[in-house]
Amino acid sequence: MTKAEELIKILREEILPEIEAVIDEMFEEIAENKSASDEDKAEFKEAQEMKKEFEEMAFEAETGEMDEEECEENLAECREILKDIRALEEE
């Protein structure tokens, strides 16, 4: 498997679903409370922007816009992010 394929897999199967779950939780909290602080709104917007960035990264890897070296660097970053997510889930 190439680094691009690995990156696409980790993005599509692990990172994007995690971000989507966070966005869904945030949306539900905001909807339930019917009001959100400026901080809540900023965090929600940040999560949406992060999702968009990861989607763009997957697209670039899929279309070949990202070379193998760049894929390898992004893959390493994604693995670190997943490590952090899993550590938070264990707490």
Image (cartoon, grey):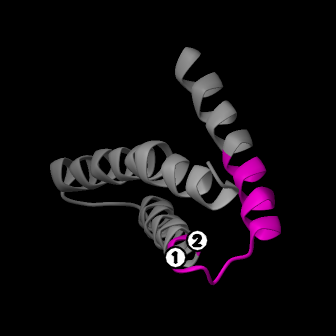
Q: In which quarter of the image is residue 7?
A: bottom right
- For the residue pair 48 and 16, the one nearer the viewer reads as 16
Which disc number belongs to residue 24? none
Residue 18 percent across, percent down from the top left: 43, 43
Of labels 1 and 2, earlier in sequence is 1
Other-residue count near label 1 (Cα within 10 Å), few / some / many at <14 / 14–19 / ≥20: few
- For the residue pair 80 and 28, the one nearer the viewer reads as 80
Q: State the quadrant of the C terminus.
A: top right
Question: Helix or strand or loop: what does disc 1 sit on?
Answer: helix
Q: Is the magenta stretch mostly helix, strand or loop?
A: helix
Whether residue 20 sits left or right of residue 46 in the image: it is: left
Q: Name the residue under label 2.
A: 61
Decide if residue 91 is in sight here. Answer: no
Instruction: Find out whether residue 38 is within the magenta segment.
Output: no
- Residue at 78 percent of width and 69 percent of height: 70
Farthest residue toward the top? 90
Which disc number belongs to residue 56? 1
- Residue at 30 percent of width and 44 percent of height: 25
Whether residue 10 sits left or right of residue 29 in the image: it is: right
